[in-house]
Structure formats: C-alpha cells, structure tokens
C-alpha cells in the first residue's frame, strides 16, 4: 500500500522529502492521494460542510426508502386512486400526511440552506480572513483557483440534490394521487421532485456566492442570501410556477353538473362565460341577488369555465422552470468568474 | 526570454488611484536581482499598494511592472514570486503539515525539505493546528510557506512587525541565511530602521505615494552629509541652500544642522559628518518635499534610453 501511495505521490519533491520527515508525515502523506492540487485544497477547506451535506443526503435517502415501504403496503392493500367519496384520501392523509409534508418542507428548504450556509461564505470568508491573498499568490492562477472553488462544491451540491430528488420522486410517484391531497403543484411535490430541486439549489447557491463575493463579509452575505432566497421563493410560487404550463379550459353549463376535470388536475381559476367563450369574473352578477338572473341574461352568461393544469404537464413544467433557473445560474456564475478574472478579489 | 533578466523588478510609471486619491503615483525604478531591499515610508506611503501590484493583488491604474522581465499580468510570474502579507493569512483549521501540503500542491517548484526544516527549527509541531500557534510560530510557518515555494523574488510586507525581539532576531537570521543560500531577491517593507540597516543593501523610499529615493545603500548614504554650523539670520546659510541639495534643515538657537547632498566641496566654516543610514532615512521621512534621489543603477528611464 505504501509503495502505491509513493508512486502516485507528488513526484520528486514529495519523494525526496520522505526520509527527512520522520514519524508523523509519511503516514499522512500517502492518504487520500485521490485529490491533488486545488481540488484537495477546496475539499480540505470545506470537508466538514461537504461531509455533513453528503451524510444528510444519504440519511434522507435512507429515510425515504424506509417510508416507501409503509406507503407501498398501504397502496397495495387499498389502491392508489382516490374513490368518489374521498374516504381513501382521508385515510391516506391520517397515516401519511405529516410524513409527506415534513419531507417536502425539508426538501423545499434545502436550496436556501445550501445557499445561506455554504454559498454565501464560500468566497466571502476567504476575503474576510485574508486567505484569498494566500491562495492568489501561489503558483496557480486566479482563474484556476476560482474554477476549483466553485466547481467542486457545486458538483457535490448537484450530486446531493440529484440523489435527494430521485429518492423522493421514487417515494412520491406511486402515491401521487393521494399524497398532499393529490396537489402536485402547491403541495410541495413540484419543487421536491424532478429537476427543480437541483436547479433551485444551483441558482440560489450561485447567487449566495455572488453576494458573498460582492459584500465580502460572511454574516452580511448570509443575511442578504436569506432575504433573496425568501423573495425568490415568493416570486416562484406566486408569479412563475403557474405560468410554466398551459391552462386548459373546461366549460360546462351554468346550471349544469359540477366539473369533471381529468384526475390529478389542479384547478387554477373559475370564470363565467358567454356562449361564444367571452369570460367574466366569477363574482359577476352576484349582487344584488334578486337581479342576478337578469344581469346574467343581459351579459349573455350561460356557462361556467374552469381553468386547470393537468398532471401530464407536470414534467414539462418542471423542466421548463429548471431550465430558466439553470440559465440564470449560468449568468450568475459567469458574472462571478468574470469578476474574479477581471480584477483581484 | 532565454536570457534571464538581471532586473528582479522594473517599474515604469506605476500608479494606483483609489476613490480617495492616488496611493502610488508615477513610480519608476528598477531593482537588480540578488539584493535585499528595504521598502521604507510612513504609513499610507504606498508600500502595501506597491507590494500588491507586484503580487497581482492590486491592479495598477497606470504604468507597467515587470518581474524578471516578465510583465506582472502574466500568470507565469506567480511561480517565481512569494508574498508574505502583513497579517500572514493562513487557514486556522489546517494543521502545520496540511499548510505545507497546500504549498506542495499548489507550487511546482516546492521544496518540502526546506519548508520542514524551517518549521522544525522553531520547534513547531507538524500536527498542531495553525489556530493554536503563537504569533511567532505562525510567522515561522508563513515563512516556511513563502520559502518552500523556492521563489526568485520574496516580497514581505512588514514581516517582523508583530514579533517579539527574540523571534524577530531569529526570523531575520533565517531570512538572511535562506536568501544568501538560494540567491533570492528580497523586497521587504519595514518600519524598523535599525533592522533595515543590518539587513538591507538596497533602499526604496516612498512618501505620499511617490518615490523619494532608490538605490544601493552604499551609494545613497555616502551621497549625504550632516552639516552643522552657525545659523545666519535664524536660518540655514543661503550658500548651503543654493550650492547643495538640501534635504532637511533644523535650527536650534544659533546653530543649524542640515542633511544635504553636497554638489561640491563644503565650506570650511561648517562641520560636516557622514550620517548613518538611519539618519538619512529619518530625514527623508520627515521631509516629504525633499528632492528625489535615484541612483544610476536603480534609474529605469535613463538606462533604457542609453540602451536604446
């Protein structure tokens, strides 16, 4: 083993020193020769945080796998589609609702946690403690340093979020019509499955890195990243998410039977409509009640319209959203690289 | 490029402007390789800015800087230059051995045996974390990192300022010995005039961002005379002012004393003494308006013109 370590070792410099180093160093030198140069430095600097990230990921994946056993037992015994009366839906919620909601709220916090506790201090702490002067004056150029500093942690973030997302998707998809009352959009599944978790983590983390680089103070950068993450989350849920898909219209007579949208659809909006499809707000002609019929007759309202997003759109919406986030990530990282290359940090 | 440049540093019109003004302005000189050079000046004179420009930590606003004939903007310079910043930044959670490994991983010319010798001679355990070391031990590790890189040029920003006298003595001995052994050019900024007198054979004096003096100490110091005599009308005699270059003058009672650069024989009516390096430096630091003195060897523009 020692021979192998030595051959893989650092050429003449490392070898020549071995006889002089005495007791402690030769034992330490051959270990983890897998990582060399800048990647070694980046790993050594962040090994605690990166190890915690990997361990939490593995733990969560194991938990999801364990939870899946119970879910599958339930589904095998009672079926995976809600019945007309909703009894199965309620029974599923009794057993699994708190589990699914804590899982999704954990996963929805992952991007912000990574951004605040890992992204923001990544460069800011080097600037705050002056160690950027130390690394920038070694023989490796600034460009290679910034590439390694960004590349290794972001690669590990991608690995962890891909695993988390895959494991949770595996847990959620058999029960998707029951979990979170079948609400795949607002219930948290949209952000916790597929590519969105990965893309959101990359986007917020690179923004955190950029804030850190510009603010140069760890705590201030963390606060800025936290505020930015909250704002992003709000904009994402309120303004962006719904527009990623195409709204489908379901039209039925004003006095007719209740809507029968495809299973797994998410109802977004209600309208009143004329025969030729002109839409009115749902509160049109509601008061005074006495004249409501006359009012509707005057406007020609004969139908009700429901706008909804059907489940087959979900994957497409997720990839579109992830694509937007990844494009923004590329812009932010490009800015960070350009800034670091253009002038000293 | 195959012919190595004899000049460790060539600065041509180097300047750096910050929002609050010029930190360094129109700085032109050159430093031949193999010298131990002191960079002297009051706080805010531009010493750290100059060292920053030489280590690519500061982007100059004007002018160019070449190290061993290579423009400082070329990353190839990094291998040949070591920099020890004033606060000696090291990763506090790294052990000493890991800190040396950092040097080994990032520098192709790394000399592990040399770095370990420097650390061991100070009885710094390799397994200790940097955060637990004393100031002197930290400085020693930082020195080991700087020397282990085997630089051709070593830039030190007030390397001894936070050391006790014993550690300071040890470090300056180490610096002299290592520089002599490897022929390293050293440029160190310092406030310790006595230390400079012992160690350095080249001087660069900055004041208010401008170059005041540059050259070999054995040329610069003997170019000055400390003159004392009877004051005329409560001031320095006009003859001294007009015929010689006056650096600094003081009048005490009926006596004047002045540091001058004689431009010819001095009048017999005054008493002239050779000043020490410390006296010359103090005079230049006290009078930022004194005329600039750059020795022929250190003059950048002049020699280039003759060469051309």
Image: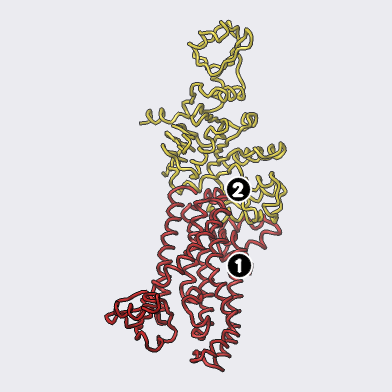
Chain colours: A red, B yellow
Q: Is residue A284 visible?
A: yes
Give residue A25's mark: none
| Whole-percent x, y for residue A272 in the image | 35, 78
For image coordinates 53% across by 32% down, the residue present is: B45
Is B144 positioned to the left or the right of B124 in the image?
A: left
User: Which chain is home to disc 1?
Assistant: A
Which residue occupies the foreground of this view, B247 or B219? B247
- The foreground one among B284 and A256 is A256
- Relative depth, front residue between A99 and B141: A99
Question: Considering the numbered disc 2 on the image, is that residue within a helix, a strand or a loop?
Answer: loop
B165 lies above or below A294: above
Q: Which mark is residue B89?
A: 2
Relative vertical location of residue A133 with respect to residue A249 in this rendering, above or below: above
Q: Pinpoint the chain carrying mark 2.
A: B
To which quarter of the image does residue B102 belong?
bottom right
Q: Residues within 10 Å of mark 1 (few under 14, many from 20)?
A: few
Quote the CA–CA distance across marks 1 and 2.
25 Å
Report the side of A78 relative to B1 (left or right): right
| Image vertical order of residue B254 relative to residue A5, above or below | above
Residue placed under numbered mark 1 in the picture:
A51
């Amino acid at each position: 083993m020692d021979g192998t370590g030595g051959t893989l070792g650092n050429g003449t410099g490392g070898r020549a020193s071995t006889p002089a180093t005495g007791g402690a160093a030769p034992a330490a030198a051959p270990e983890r020769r897998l990582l060399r140069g800048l990647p070694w430095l980046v790993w050594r600097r962040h090994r605690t945080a990166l190890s915690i990230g990997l361990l939490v990921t593995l733990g969560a994946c194991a938990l999801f796998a364990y939870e899946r056993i119970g879910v599958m037992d339930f589904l095998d015994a009672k079926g995976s589609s809600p019945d007309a009366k909703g009894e199965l839906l309620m029974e599923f919620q009794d057993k699994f609702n708190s589990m699914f909601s804590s899982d999704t709220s954990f996963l929805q916090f992952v991007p912000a946690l990574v951004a605040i506790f890992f992204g923001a201090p990544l460069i800011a702490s080097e600037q705050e403690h002056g160690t950027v002067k130390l690394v920038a004056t070694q023989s490796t150029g600034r460009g290679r340093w910034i590439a390694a500093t960004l590349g290794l942690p972001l690669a590990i973030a991608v690995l962890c979020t891909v695993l988390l997302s895959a494991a949770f998707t595996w847990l959620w998809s058999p029960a998707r019509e029951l979990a979170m009352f079948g609400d795949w959009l607002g219930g948290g599944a949209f952000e916790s499955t597929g590519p969105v978790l990965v893309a959101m983590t990359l986007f917020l983390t690179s923004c955190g890195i950029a804030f850190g680089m510009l603010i140069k103070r760890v705590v201030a950068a963390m606060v800025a990243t936290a505020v930015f993450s909250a704002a992003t989350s709000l904009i994402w849920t309120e303004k962006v998410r719904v527009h990623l898909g195409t709204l489908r219209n379901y039209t039925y007579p004003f006095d007719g039977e209740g809507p029968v949208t495809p299973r797994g659809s998410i109802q977004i909006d209600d309208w009143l409509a004329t025969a030729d499809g002109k839409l009115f707000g749902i509160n049109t002609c509601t008061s005074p009640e006495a004249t409501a019929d006359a009012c509707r007759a005057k406007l020609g309202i004969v139908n009700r319209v429901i706008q909804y997003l059907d489940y087959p759109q979900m994957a497409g919406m997720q990839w579109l959203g992830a694509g937007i986030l990844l494009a923004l990530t590329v812009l932010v990282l490009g800015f960070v690289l350009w800034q670091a290359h253009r002038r000293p940090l | 490029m195959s012919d190595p440049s004899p000049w460790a540093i060539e600065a041509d019109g180097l300047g750096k402007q910050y929002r609050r003004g010029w930190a360094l302005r129109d700085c032109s000189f050159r430093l031949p390789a193999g010298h131990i050079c002191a960079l002297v000046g009051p706080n805010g004179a531009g010493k750290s800015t100059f060292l920053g420009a030489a280590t690519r930590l500061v982007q100059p606003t004007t002018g160019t800087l070449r190290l061993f004939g290579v423009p400082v903007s070329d990353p190839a310079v990094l291998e040949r230059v070591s920099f020890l910043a004033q606060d000696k930044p090291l990763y506090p959670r790294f052990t000493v051995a890991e800190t040396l490994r950092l040097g080994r991983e990032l520098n192709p010319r790394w000399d592990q045996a040399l770095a370990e010798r420097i650390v061991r001679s100070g009885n710094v355990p390799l397994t200790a974390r940097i955060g637990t070391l004393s100031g002197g031990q930290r400085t020693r590790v930082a020195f080991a990192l700087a020397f282990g890189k085997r630089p051709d040029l070593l830039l030190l920003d007030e390397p001894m300022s936070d050391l006790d006298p014993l550690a300071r003595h040890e470090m300056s001995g180490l610096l002299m010995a290592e520089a002599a052994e490897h022929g390293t050019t050293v440029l160190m900024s310092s406030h310790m005039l006595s230390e400079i007198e012992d160690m350095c054979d080249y001087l660069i004096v900055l004041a208010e961002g401008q170059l005041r003096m540059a050259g070999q100490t054995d040329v610069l110091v003997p170019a000055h005379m400390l003159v004392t005599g009877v004051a005329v009308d409560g001031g320095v005699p006009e003859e001294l002012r007009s015929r010689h270059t006056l650096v600094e003058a003081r009048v005490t009672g009926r006596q004047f004393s002045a540091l001058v650069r004689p431009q010819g024989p001095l009048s017999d009516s005054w008493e002239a003494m050779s000043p020490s390096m410390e006296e010359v430096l103090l005079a230049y630091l006290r009078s930022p308006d004194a005329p600039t003195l750059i020795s022929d060897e250190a003059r950048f523009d002049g020699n280039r013109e003759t060469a051309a």
